[in-house]
Amino acid sequence: MPPFRGTSKERDLENGEPDTERKRSRQFSRSSIAQPGDLDEYQALDKYISTYRDPKAAAVDDAEGQQKDADDARKGKPWWAFWRSGTSSQAKESDPGVIPDDWLEADIHQGISAQDVEARRRRFGFNELATEKENMFIKFLMFFTGPILYVMELAVLLAAGLRDWVDFGVIIGILFLNAAVGWYQEKQAADVVASLKGDIAMKAVVIRDGHEEEIKARELVPGDIIVVEEGFTVPADARLICDYEKPEDFAKYRELKEQDQFGVSSDPDDEGGEKEDDEKDEDDDPKHIHQGHPIVACDQSAITGESLAVDKYMGDTVFYTTGCKRGRSYAVCLTSAKHSFVGRTASLVQGAKDQGHFKAIMNSIGTALLVIVVFWILIAWIGGFFHHLKIATPESDSEDLLRYALILLIIGVPVGLPVVTTTTLAVGAAYLAKQQAIVQKLTAIESLAGVDVLCSDKTGTLTANQLSIREPFVSEGQDVNWMMAVAALASSHNVKSLDPIDKVTILTIKRYPKARQILQQKWVTEKFTPFDPVSKRITTVCHLDGVKYTCAKGAPKAILALTNCSKETGDLFKSKATEFARRGFRSLGVAYKKNEEEWILLGMLSMFDPPREDTAQTIVEAQQLGVPVKMLTGDAIAIAKETCKMLALGTKVYNSQKLIHGGLSGTTQHDLVERADGFAEVFPEHKYQVVEMLQQRGHLTAMTGDGVNDAPSLKKADCGIAVEGASEAAQAAADIVFLAPGLSTIVLAIKTARQIFQRMKAYIQYRIALCLHLEIYLVTSMVIINETIRVDLIVFIALFADLATVAVAYDNAHSEARPVEWQLPKIWIISVILGILLALGTWVIRGTLYMPNGGIIQNFGAVQPILFLEVALTENWLIFVTRGGNTWPSWQLVGAILGVDALATIFCLFGWLSGDGEPADPVSRNTKLNHHGKTDGWVDIVTVVVIWGYSIGVTIVIAIVYYLLNQIPWLDNLGRKTRSHADTQMENIIGHISKLAVEHEVDDHGKSRYILATKASAEEEEE
């Protein structure tokens, strides 16, 4: 151990720019990027230890900067271009992504100019994986498409043909109102989501106009000179130019480029990998020559599956979203994100435009309603033939066959159904965005509402992702301060982007002043080797006073294997590692060697990532919602089980090897996944398999993930959730992106999704019942008494229904205590019963008008306005029944319905558009119809009050019937799918087939043949 020294007088390292922790300045010198000020590596490390602030403590200071980022996300379009979405609208979709060679010739010290940036962005758009930008005008026109809308457009043509211009105008008004409301609400929701996406923006260091700047990665253009450095994500596909510390090598780069010495690779599998592959590539491509020493090392496991970081040389390509693990280099951007390797892969995923289960449900309801309305039109026409009605004459009368068809088309097809449902989803998405959950696909809300299994990461979701070091274990005869100093030496010193483990190791030095004094001595780092999953350790070679020290930190077994310690010391070390694991601690062994001497085992650090404060309660809430949580973690099984105990999760946690290579297959394997509370030592392919097996059992599964390698399982899941801090590729594959950490956000999103689902379900039940109500009443009225409600009043009934129920999107709703689903048979049965009750209610009031004493009429009135008011009131109030009584209705819904009711009342009082109001057959003997010679359809105020009272009574009766229907057990479960069903025979067949492989062999006579054989086990393959 080196001797302790007194430190020289320290510089004032406490002072500095207050915004340094939040954001580097837009422009700064090249030296300031290397390390803060003029400090060397270890001085910068000491400053970091002194000045580090907890991000939570700095959150208030960050608010202003975050608001600025959010404001920036809204910019990007001129004020008059209201139809644009805020990002580049001029990127050409047909652009093949081919970059002119002269674009890649920029000088590393000068970069490209602002004018070049604008010109290139106009051609290639922003450097981001984004969904296709929608033309706002085309999107508006899309609200006029679909089976239901086509029927209403047919009604427009029919009204024009009948020269019924009032109805013609009102129907067009209804169509445009629905389209405008739907378009506006979706745009508002999209704007809210877009404003939050600035919070997850990747950053990049770029050279432009002779200055180094930190910008959002989306602002990069092809040909930009960027700095690729350790700890940062590569912001674009780029070609390495030269080491950052050796800019003089730029001349060599240019010379080799002119000689065409660099192989062009657009596929990461063409680089790195196993040695044999490299040799083969070099033989096949004589131009593929590594120049000099490796400049950087990149972790490409997310793309290629390689375990080790891949060394990259001058002229090699580094790929978008991969992580730089070592080194620092200048590089030139080769293309935009859309045309990068990851972008091309993502485009394959995005290419399939899945309309989703929600769209299928809407289409099935719409189609059923169309069939029903055609049936009722047929019945009405048959009745009309018996009443000797003409096709379209007399022109001024409502009693002809085409007007019957027009009336039934208007009331039988709910024009507001597509708009109200999509508006409800859009408003819900905007609300979720305010809760830090970005919905990228509206139909994901429906999927999230029905989820019954949640597969969750541990770190950062169930736990706080705030590692802390507990009391370390120190080997006999070793000093704890020296051990902590060695652990800090065997860590990355890039303070701008530290791994969580390295970060907590370095910051813990504050608790050990003598260890900090050791670090303040004149250390010089010769070589740093980051962690890799093969060696399972981090190694640093450094020098002090001419003595070479090799410091290592890593998995206890890997560190113990380096040393030749005594059996007693080794056994004690192993027992401590086991004890730490049982207590839920992550262990890291620490060792060093001096010059070429033996390795010395110093001890072990115990790290603990505590559960989030709200996690245990949130898991209980999730279970109460019928969503059990399965924990998938890369940690050891002992740590996973201990974490489960802390979180009140079950402890049936299995090693992922049991899932893949445990000899299980078929039903047994599926049973294991269903029964398990979690899996430990999980890799991304295990996540995909867990999701697939749960889906095969009928479960709707949500999956959380953060890496590019999680993208397949996120896409496979019924609802893929990219957690806070996820990579761009994971965000692109996910249905929902969370900006806030923790499981509570996910559970809140599930509750909100179920509330949104409840609003849609209530509206659909309401709308089907409305259609059936008027179809049943009007057709029976046409057939029996040759009477109908005037078409002018019918269009206003339809208009009022749509006006009132657009507010459903803002209604209060309750969250079901179990996963929800459409249960279409139940919806149809209840809606039919409600429609029949409404029709009976209307027939009762119509029947009273035949009574000689006036029936419901108190002083004077007319048939048409009385029927109009009763139908309008009972239909509007039905939404209060179907929404349920678990919550009070919102003021928006109450206000909209009361406003429409007031309009309907005025229509009734003054007899607007009601005509004569006399039935054709039979003639009523009611003495109060059109009393005192009134033929204008007026109705007295007392009669209107009685109609209101009668309508309230009808609504109460319907509410009681609705409540009783929902108490019937078989009806309550009608249409629910079995969430856990096993097809034992098929699962076993597939399990056995999966163990087979096709082998090719050549017999003694040289003939080829293919045979079925059992797959080799993983152990045999390794041998």
Image (spheres, rainbow, N blue to C red):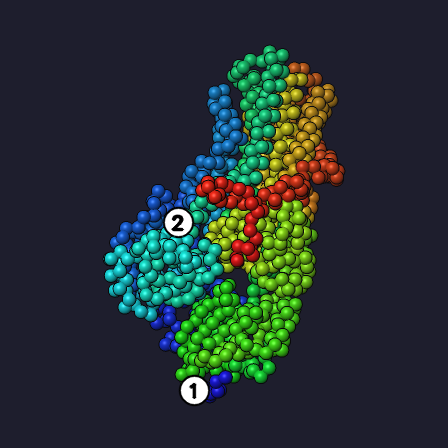
Q: Residue at x 58, y 43 (%)?
A: 993
- Depicted 858 relative to depicted 653: above or below: above
Residue beneath label 2, please?
338
- Depicted 424 relative to depicted 483: above or below: above
User: Which of the two residues, 791 or 532, is positioned nearer the viewer here?
Assistant: 532
Q: Indicate the secondary structure of the residue bearing disc 2.
A: helix
Q: What crowding class fits label 2: few (fewer than 14 Cα within 10 Å), some (14-19), or many (20 or more)?
A: many
Distance from the alpha carbon under mark 2 to that under mark 1: 53 Å
Residue 133: which quarter of the image?
top left
User: Which of the two residues, 814 or 662, is positioned nearer the viewer here?
Assistant: 662
- Kind of residue at badge 2: Lys
Residue beneath label 1, please?
8
Q: Residue at x 56, y 73 (%)?
A: 560
Q: Which mark is residue 158?
A: none
> Does the rendering let one see residue 291?
yes
Q: Residue at x 53, y 79 (%)?
A: 600
**Residue 40 percent location from the top left of the image:** 39, 77
**Residue 273 percent location from the top left of the image:** 43, 57
User: Which of the two residues, 755 or 973, is positioned nearer the viewer here?
Assistant: 973
